[in-house]
Image (tube, helix red, strand yellow):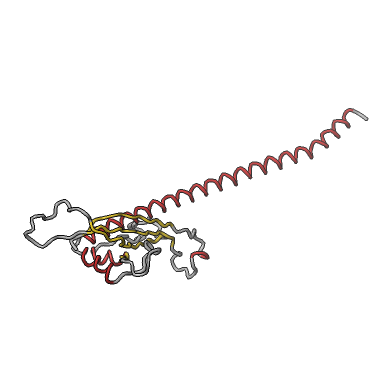
Amino acid sequence: MSPALKRYLARKSQRGTTVVVVVMVTTLITAIGVFAVRNASQIDQAVGYSRQSSQTIALAELGTSAAISDFGANKAAAYVAQMVNQPETCIANSILPAGTPCARLFRSDIEASTQDTLLEPTVEGSETGSLGPSGAMMGDLYVEVTERHPTGRPIAGTDLGGTGPELKYAKVTLTTTAQIRPTAPTGSTDDLCNAGVAAVAAKKVMRARVVVGPI
């Protein structure tokens, strides 16, 4: 066998190896690209969930503050009386016997009482609203008023002279439940599970022990 033929046969056998190496390298590069894209997508998703969680915490704080403000608008007596005389079924005291004093304040109740809007809607092309520019999220909250107890001590700043009506105060617990969840795209008649959106709701519960009055 001549040397030229030997070289030709050797090169011919190496062609298959070269093709295998090229295919392996291409596959590896493709896998790295797919992993990088998926990793970036998961990071964006995690950031979105974190933002939604932070917004829900802020909404729970807003609901608690708004309820306290509502109590301070000379409505403490009415709410405390509602707790006792017309008790509602509340999640905060679900393990207690039926009829345990409780009053529920919904977002619409607080907004009607305070004459203020807790969540501003998104106006496309002009304003971002309370939950961001996309308008694909909605929020809601309610406050449960439970555990009415006497204060056990005079309240700072109250009249102790006895010249006027006695001002009575009480301790109550405010349990605020806030939720932010996605909405279906505009014009879609499907539910969230079929609308092609991330149907993930964030829920936060905040409890505050406050003094209300006069009652």
- Where's the C terminus, which quadrant? bottom left
Residue drawn at point x = 83 percent, y = 37 percent: 13
Residue closest to the eye, 1 or 55: 55
Q: How many marks?
A: 0
Measured as percent of width and height from the top left, residue 160 is found at: 11, 55
- Where's the N terminus, which quadrant? top right
Residue closest to the eye, 200 or 188: 200
Q: Is residue 190 left or right of residue 179?
A: right
Residue closest to the eye, 129 or 177: 177
Residue drawn at point x = 73 percent, y = 38 percent: 21
Q: Residue furthest top?
A: 3
Q: Residue furthest right?
A: 1
Residue drawn at point x = 39 percent, y = 64 percent: 94
Measured as percent of width and height from the top left, residue 213 is found at: 20, 60
Measured as percent of width and height from the top left, residue 187 is found at: 45, 68
Q: Which image quadrant for residue 210?
A: bottom left
Residue drawn at point x = 33 percent, y = 67 percent: 100
Residue closest to the eye, 48 or 81: 81
Measured as percent of width and height from the top left, residue 81 is found at: 24, 68
Seen in the picture, residue 85 relative to 122 is either above or below; the reply is below
